[in-house]
Image: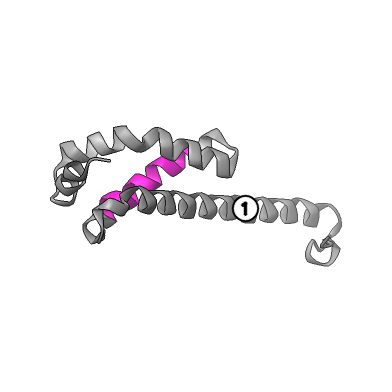
Amino acid sequence: MDSLLIEQVIDGDEAAFKKLYDMYKEKVYRIAWMLTNNESAAQDIIQEVFIQVYLKIPKLKYIEAFESWLYKITVNCSEGTVKSRLFNSKKILEKKLSKSKKYNLEENVYEY
């Protein structure tokens, strides 16, 4: 990890941010893909993660912890994406089922 590069990003250097993005985008992608198992979602997560990095890096207390911090942001964005997709899938399923038989999904889902 390059502490000087991160300091430059914190100071608002956009070229340094581009370098940081280029250095870590594949790592973020691999983590996001492992957590979502979806290429499109992983690509979206890369964008969301680096937006968060750009907005929050001035508040990073320990430059040495950058990689852990980036990992945590990636996991949080991935979890949010998975939850959102599950919620949307449930809503679509409920809508389809309600059209066919007025089926109540909550009453007919069993926990194992």
Q: Is any part of residue 41 visible from this angle? A: no
Residue at left offset 45%, top offset 44%: 45
Is 41 placed left or right of 13 in the picture? right
Instruction: Name the foreground residue: 44 vs 93.
Output: 44
Residue shown at 85%/62% (left/top)? Answer: 108
Relative image position of residue 36 (x, y in whole percent): 58, 43
Residue at image location 41% in from the left, 53% down from the top: 73
Left-right relation of 11 to 73: left
* Residue at the outermost bottom position: 107
Estimate the x, y position of residue 96 in percent, counting from the top left. 76, 50
Tell me, yes or no, whether the highlighted magenta stretch contains residue 85: no
| Quadrant of image for the N terminus | top left
Q: Is residue 27 above or below residue 6?
A: above
Q: Secondary structure at mark 1?
A: helix
Q: Estimate the x, y position of residue 71 in percent, counting from the top left.
A: 42, 49
In the rendered image, which quarter contains the C terminus? Answer: bottom right
Whole-percent x and y of residue 14?
Answer: 17, 40
Magenta segment, prevailing SS (helix, strand or loop): helix
Q: Nearer the viewer, residue 103 or 24?
A: 24
Q: Residue at x 60, y 38 (%)?
A: 37
- Asked where in the image residue 17 lies, by quadrant, the reply is top left
Query: Is 16 or 41 nearer to us in this picture?
Result: 16
- Residue 47 in sight here: yes
Residue 34: quarter of image = top right
Q: Is residue 48 magenta?
A: yes
Mark count: 1
Mark 1 surroundings: few (<14), some (14-19) or many (≥20) residues within 10 A: few
Q: Which residue is mark 1?
A: 88
Q: Disc 1 residue type?
A: Asn
- Range of magenta residues: 41-55
Q: How is the image coloured?
A: one colour
